[in-house]
Image: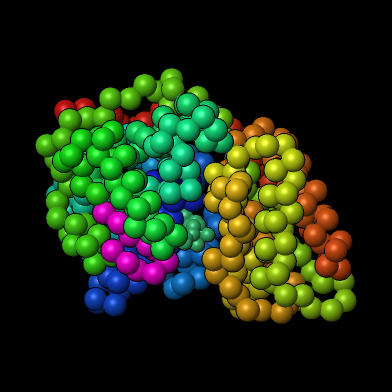
Amino acid sequence: MRFIMIGGFLGAGKTTAIARLAKHYVDAGCQVGVVTNDQAYDLVDTHALRAQGFRVGEVPGACFCCKFDDLLATVDRLASDSQPDVILTEPVGSCTDLMATVIEPLRHLHGNRFELAPLAVLLKPEHGRRILACEQRTGFSPQAEYIFLKQLEEADLAVINKIDTLDHAAQEELAAQLRSRFGDDKEILLTSGKTGAGFERLIACLETGSRAERPTLEIDYDIYAAGEAELGWLNLSAHVQANQAAFALDGLLVSLVSAIAQALQATEAETAHLKVLGNSGIDTGVANLVASDQEVELSRASGQTVPQADLVVNARVATDPEQLAEIALRSLGQVCREQGLSFNLGSVQHFRPGRPVPTHRMVR
Ligand SMILES: Nc1nc2c(ncn2[C@@H]2O[C@H](COP(=O)(O)OP(=O)(O)OP(=O)(O)O)[C@@H](O)[C@H]2O)c(=O)[nH]1
Ligand SMILES: [Mg+2]
């Protein structure tokens, strides 16, 4: 099994890139399995990838490094009906040190089962431009920025993503900042998960071996833990139902993300990624916000007008999780009132991620 991991900060475009890669491998006749990962349950990404027809297993509850055995068990479950040729994995976007805690343990303990692809890490331009330029106001603390930079430092392939949103000068500037920070031998790629630009090269690079010879990342787990704990995490599910007429599902998703974003703006809390998925039972839509100064995007349109739907909200915002949950619930109530809907709440999980305690950490 070829084991491919696509890392990168929250909202960098990992799931979008994985969907494109999965389609490439399926079209090439390969059996493909995808593994998603989150600190909590009810993952937008799992639903969104399944809605595109992919076989997806998930590791909820903590990052891959802390749930190494669950990652293997999930791969085994995916392999139980038919053995995948390719496993695509998406770690939590606030997670780093993946070489030492996932790739190296796979090489040493399960090297006979997996061919390990180079670790690809997507650079999120919306926050990356500010963090790499050492701007004063990036929206995040130095500890959260530390995670952003450590992810890129350990990458075999540093992938400047979303190039459809960057002109040539901006792409060059990001590449120059990566080189000056991490050295000229850092392999830098340019991609757009949205248009497919750069994917031929990414795929060619992923087909080579992982860079076994690189020294282990030096990382301070106190700073890493503090950076993760800065993020408020909210996963919420709800069922919405029209009081009278059917409603446009995509419009509801965009309105809900916009209402939450507006309320967060008033508190000056920076959004890392806010996503809301709606499933009508027939099709699925997703709306996203990847930074506080960006527009809300309908990344997947359901095109449905429906009497009822299931919603999943996943929000990662640099704010108090209690306040985040309160804002999301208030916004849900407000949008439902405006659109003549009632809702029943499913589960609500909100917290700050705990200190990462990897199952293994293999240094060289
Ligand atoms: N313009 C543009 N937008 C993109 C691209 N890739 C992803 N996006 C958008 O960025 C947002 C986040 O994309 P995801 O693929 O969900 O990002 P992610 O890294 O998986 O996010 P988390 O799992 O929350 O960490 C969505 O609105 C996508 O449509 C890209 O290449 N170009
Ligand atoms: Mg994702």
Q: Is residue 340 left or right of residue 231?
A: right
Instruction: Examine the image and state in which quarter residue 202 appears.
Output: bottom left
The residue depicted at 85 percent of the width and 63 percent of the height is: 338
Q: Nearer the viewer, residue 277 or 193?
A: 193
Residue 133 lies in the magenta-colored region = no
Instruction: Examine the image and state in which quarter residue 81 appears.
Output: bottom left
The x, y position of residue 52, in whole percent, is 46, 72
Q: Nearer the viewer, residue 124 or 229?
A: 124
The x, y position of residue 245, in whole percent, is 84, 79
Q: Is residue 140 above or below residue 298?
A: above
Q: Is residue 305 left or right of residue 156?
A: right
Q: Is residue 12 above or below residue 130?
A: below
Residue at the far left: name it.
213
The residue depicted at 51 percent of the width and 64 percent of the height is: 48
The x, y position of residue 228, in whole percent, is 50, 32
Q: Is residue 76 left or right of residue 229?
A: left
Asked if residue 246 shows in the view, the reply is: yes
- Residue bounds of the magenta highlight: 189-198
Q: Nearer the viewer, residue 279 or 122?
A: 122
Quarter of the picture containing the N terminus is: bottom left
Q: Is residue 337 left or right of residue 223?
A: right
Q: Is residue 228 above or below residue 283?
A: above
The residue depicted at 76 percent of the width and 65 percent of the height is: 240
* Most common SS among magenta residues: loop
Instruction: Examine the image and state in which quarter residue 301 appears.
Output: bottom right
Residue at the far front: name it.
169
